[in-house]
């Protein structure tokens, strides 16, 4: 299972919760709220939230630039003077938010390009 994030809002007329946007990256949802909140309010929505759900879908590699743990190590180890092994580097990257791992069962990661 993979974590998928959705921006939800309440329609002021119907009082129903609606999905406004979705992404495998939480930061994309936060950015979308920042960018669209004013427009959504004008369209009659309120109470914007980011919620997460577990889905069987996987991120599209063309959209999310998935990178393997080996490739991540090869490109990032020099930044740490090769003082971290692959597992330590991945652990550090996840801890600080440089990378996310959509599916913990797979050795694939998404690099946070805004880090």
Image: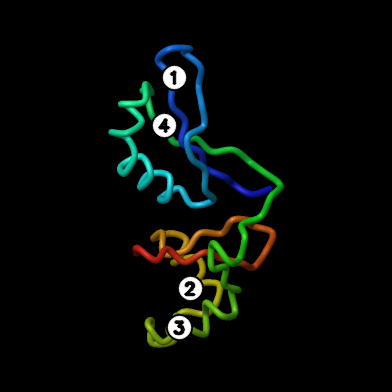
- State yes or no: discs 4 and 3 in contact (Cβ < 8 Å): no
Nearer-N-terminus badge (3/2): 3
Residue 11 marker:
1
Nearer-N-terminus badge (1/2): 1
| Residue furthest to the left | 38
Residue 50 vs residue 43: left or right? right
- Distance from label 1 to label 4 (Cα)? 13 Å
Residue under label 2, please give it: 89
Q: Residues within 10 Å of mark 4 (few under 14, many from 20)?
A: some
Residue under label 4, please give it: 49
Nearer-N-terminus badge (1/3): 1
Q: Residue at x 40, y 50 (%)?
A: 27
- State yes or no: discs 3 and 2 in contact (Cβ < 8 Å): yes
Q: Is residue 28 above or below residue 11?
A: below
- Distance from label 1 to label 2 (Cα)? 44 Å
Residue under label 3, please give it: 77
The scheme the figure's colours follow is rainbow
1 or 3: mark nearer the eye: 1
Q: Is residue 43 above or below residue 93?
A: above
- Distance from label 1 to label 3 (Cα)? 48 Å
Nearer-N-terminus badge (2/4): 4
Q: Position of residue 54 (x, y in %)?
A: 63, 41
């Amino acid at each position: 299972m993979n974590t998928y994030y959705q921006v939800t809002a309440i329609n002021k007329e119907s009082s129903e919760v609606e999905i406004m946007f979705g992404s495998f990256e939480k930061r994309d949802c936060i950015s979308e709220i920042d960018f669209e909140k004013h427009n959504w309010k004008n369209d009659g929505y309120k109470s914007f939230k980011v919620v997460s759900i577990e889905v069987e879908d996987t991120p599209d590699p063309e959209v999310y630039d998935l990178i393997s743990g080996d490739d991540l190590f090869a490109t990032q180890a020099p930044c740490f003077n090769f003082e971290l092994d692959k597992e330590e580097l991945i652990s550090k990257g996840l801890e600080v938010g440089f990378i996310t791992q959509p599916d913990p069962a797979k050795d694939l990661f998404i690099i946070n390009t805004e880090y």
